[in-house]
Image (spheres, grey):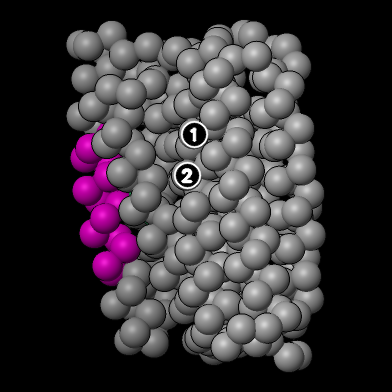
Amino acid sequence: MDKDKIIILLNKDLEDEHAAIIQYLSHAYAIGEGEMACEIEAISREEMRHLDWLAEAIVELGGTPSLVRGKMLLEGKFVAKWMENNVFLEDGAIAQYKEHIKLTSDPMIKRLLRRILSDEEAHRDQFKRFVEKAKVEGVEDLRGIRQDKVIQLLNWAIEHEYTVILQYMFHSYMTTNKAAKKELEDQAINEMQHLGWLAEAIVDIGGSPMIEHTEIDQSIKNASMLRADIEIESEVAIEYDRAAKEFADPNLKKLLFRMRDHELYHDEIFSDLLKGGKHQIKD
Ligand SMILES: [Fe+2]
Ligand SMILES: [Fe+2]
Ligand SMILES: [Fe+2]
């Protein structure tokens, strides 16, 4: 099989990992802070590592990591049904990885896919246990139907965070500058924290987190990437500052000021990379 075909297979796997990450995070946020939510979040983090390995392998082969999210299974009113959906998703992943292992001749790719497959088999077993656990323990969907301006702003913030996570990860895969790669990865991880805090805050005050993203900057030149990243950081810092001052709830105020400070930090880090410092970017 030639490189281009392998890249297509790996991108299909990557898109499905992306869907699994968001599906599992949605479940974890909806059921709150118990043991099961923590375990589901841990599974989601393993899917993030899979996505990361696949993206790096795609770039290594000369390809571009896909930003498309595969199909999610989010239907069902009860948590046990969600866990059944997750078993179904893992079954699909297992079948697909087995097929892709057979189709590829590249030994490094085969090894990587086998490594991921072993995780998916473990996840399937975990989710099978969670189907029973959800029934026995009566694990519930804690999301509410509140839909006022506060919830809208917090969901707007989630949309921003999800967008920059994908954007910084994409830029980190495509950049040729090592210092930029490291910073983009670090800041993407920080944005993942923000997304989690926002989703938990929404559920706490009786709303429902919407995990959707908006347009992602797909520049591949170092300077253009950083310019786009600086622009989005300075915009969101202003917006978080404004919202923090407006919010009455002291916890939400603190959360938004804290995120504003992080965004200002990101802005400065990216600006240093672009304008000066020891790792200055020229192209
Ligand atoms: Fe995975
Ligand atoms: Fe999995
Ligand atoms: Fe953020």
In the image, residue 224 sits, relative to residue 147, either above or below, namely: below
- Spatial CA distance of label 1 from label 2 is 6 Å
Left or right: where 15 falls relative to 272: left
How many numbered marks are there? 2
> Residue 91's quadrant in the figure?
top left
- Does the CB distance between marks 1 and 2 fall below 8 Å? yes
- Residue in the foreground of this view, choosing between 187 and 133: 187
Residue 255 magenta-highlighted:
no
- Residue in the foreground of this view, choosing between 267 and 226: 267
Local SS, label 1? helix
Tell me residue 18's x, y (percent): 52, 52
Q: Quick one: quadrant of the C terminus?
A: bottom right
User: Residue at coordinates 28% horizontally, 9% vertically from top-left?
Assistant: 138
| Disc 1 target residue | 197
Q: Is residue 242 visible?
A: yes
In the image, residue 56 sits, relative to residue 245, either above or below, namely: below
Start-end of magenta stretch: 114-127
Q: Is mark 1 within 8 Å of ligand 3?
A: no
Residue 115 magenta-highlighted:
yes
Q: Is residue 65 visible?
A: no
- Residue in the foreground of this view, choosing between 244 and 129: 244
